[in-house]
Image (tube, helix red, strand yellow):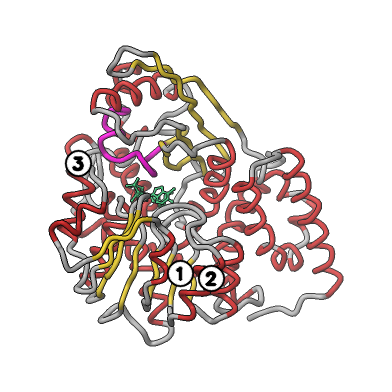
Amino acid sequence: MATILSEESLTQAKEYVDRVYKTVIARNPHESEFHQAVKEIFESLIPVLAKEPHYIKHNILERIVEPERFITFRVPWVDDNGNVQVNRGFRVQYNSALGPYKGGLRFHPSVNASIIKFLGFEQIFKNALTGQPIGGGKGGSDFDPKGKSENEIMRFTQSFMTELYKYVGPDVDVPAGDIGVGAREIGYMYGQYKRIRGSIEAGVLTGKGIGYGGSLGRKEATGYGLIYFVEEMLKSKGLGFKDATVVVSGSGNVSIYAMEKAQQLGARVVACSDSNGYVYDPQGINLETVKRIKEVERKRIREYVKEHPHATYTEGCEGIWSIPCDIALPCATQNEISEASARLLVANGVKAVGEGANMPSTLEAIDVFLKNGVLFGPAKAANAGGVAVSALEMSQNSMRLSWSFEEVDAKLHQIMKNIYQSSVKAAEEYGYPGNLLVGANIAGFKRVADAMIAQGVV
Ligand code: NDP
């Protein structure tokens, strides 16, 4: 039941949010992605701060927005020509109120403090939404894996872990993959950690290979989880994936398994992309081809049209959103849907947008979706399946047991349904019915904020 909030309490909450946001800008200058993530979350918390002003009294926002720890380090390594290269490594240990820090590692040349902090900040609320005992963290490096040999990748990741090992551990901080970090890189990091520590601590990393402590279903989890979440959104309007036309950006881990599950549910997935361009296949994307090109051969998506000549390839990423579709699933990277692309999607009749990537829609794009009645699944709810199954991998490692794929998938499905329900409920309770962005932020925030307050001034 929604409560009517007084003007006075709303004004007080807005002033508080404004004041803390200004502090964030002053303390973290030039970090535009971080500012964007903070703004999105803070603004949606105004109703909860107005209704429950004790959060203001505890100055919870200023505490929650300041990482518990932010680590940067040198990563020296030797390339195949014998030259010494130096990259920068990062780990933000953002919030441990609910459990060990948990969040992926990203290897991409665009990685900097702003990107790591935006991802880490979002991760706190995402992890809380899953209902599992995990805090929020994130990390990575400005290392560019593209064009590197197998040996270079291994030497770099080993050097990265040679420093990172000091800060992580199964009960402290548990990294996983993200852009540029998949099972191969996790394997090299796990091997290096084990050599340094001299003991088996399987729960130190998730996304490991199945043969040495990985969980069945982890590889599929983010993509499948996204589809389970969007399915719930669609059901609320009597819709479904069957016969729907779907556009999915990216062709990495999240994208591939989102396409797979959408196809299993009867959707026609007509386009996907990589950081160079996109393919449009009106007959439906052939996933076997995409998997081979991207997962095995590690080549560019443009190779697809050589085998499927009826499909077309277009240079540049953003044009993918000009393809008419019922459901759009951005699964590549941050800010990939601009306001103009959002308008185009709406003009072409999009019914639902589910964010597989982190912060793929700009604030202006989100506004366009919400104002036009598009069902909108925000990243921290819709893509939480990956971290949820990572937490299940941690549980299996602690118990020294392995669950079957079906068991893990069933748990994932239930977690995604729960996240959807708690987002819907919080949105309704705080006066924004149907707004899953507000609902997810509030539901995640309350869990973390209440735990922090219960633990004293931390
Ligand atoms: P991958 O590295 O497996 O794939 C990323 C895909 O996005 C690739 O197709 C890549 O193209 C493309 N891409 C990367 N950077 C850009 C860019 N700047 N512009 C356009 N396209 C780009 O990463 P994931 O699939 O793991 O991650 C994708 C997104 O999902 C990220 O936002 C990540 O944070 C988020 N996420 C991932 C989770 C996971 O479990 N893996 C969990 C939750 C969120 P190319 O092949 O050319 O590099």
The location of residue 198, given as percent across then percent down, is 30, 16
For label 2, being within 8 Å of ligand 1 is answered no
- Amino acid type of disc 3? Ile
Magenta range: 175-190
Which residue does the image show at 72% across and 40% down from the upper left?
A: 457
Distance, label 2 to label 3, CA atoms, is: 34 Å
Which tag, 2 or 3, sits closer to the chain's start? 3
Q: Say which residue label 2 marks.
A: 436
Q: Residue furthest right?
A: 8
The location of residue 418, given as percent across then percent down, is 43, 67
Dot 1: within a 10 Å radius of its alpha carbon, few (fewer than 14), some, or many (20 or more) residues?
many
The answer, for residue 451, to whether it is visible in the render is yes
**Near-viewer residue (95 or 90):** 90
Which residue does the image show at 15% across and 57% down from the upper left?
A: 288
Tags 2 and 1 in contact by the CB under 8 Å rule?
Answer: yes
Q: Quadrant of residue 308?
A: bottom left
**Near-viewer residue (59 or 357):** 357
Q: Is residue 192 left or right of residue 440?
A: left
Secondary structure found at label 2: helix
Which tag, 2 or 1, sits closer to the chain's start? 1
Q: Say which residue label 1 marks.
A: 420
Distance, label 3 to label 1, CA atoms, is: 29 Å
Quarter of the picture containing the C terminus is top right
- Amino acid type of disc 2? Leu
Which tag, 3 or 1, sits closer to the chain's start? 3
Which residue does the image show at 71% across and 39% down from the upper left?
A: 29
Q: Is residue 204 left or right of residue 371?
A: left
Q: Say which residue label 3 marks.
A: 210
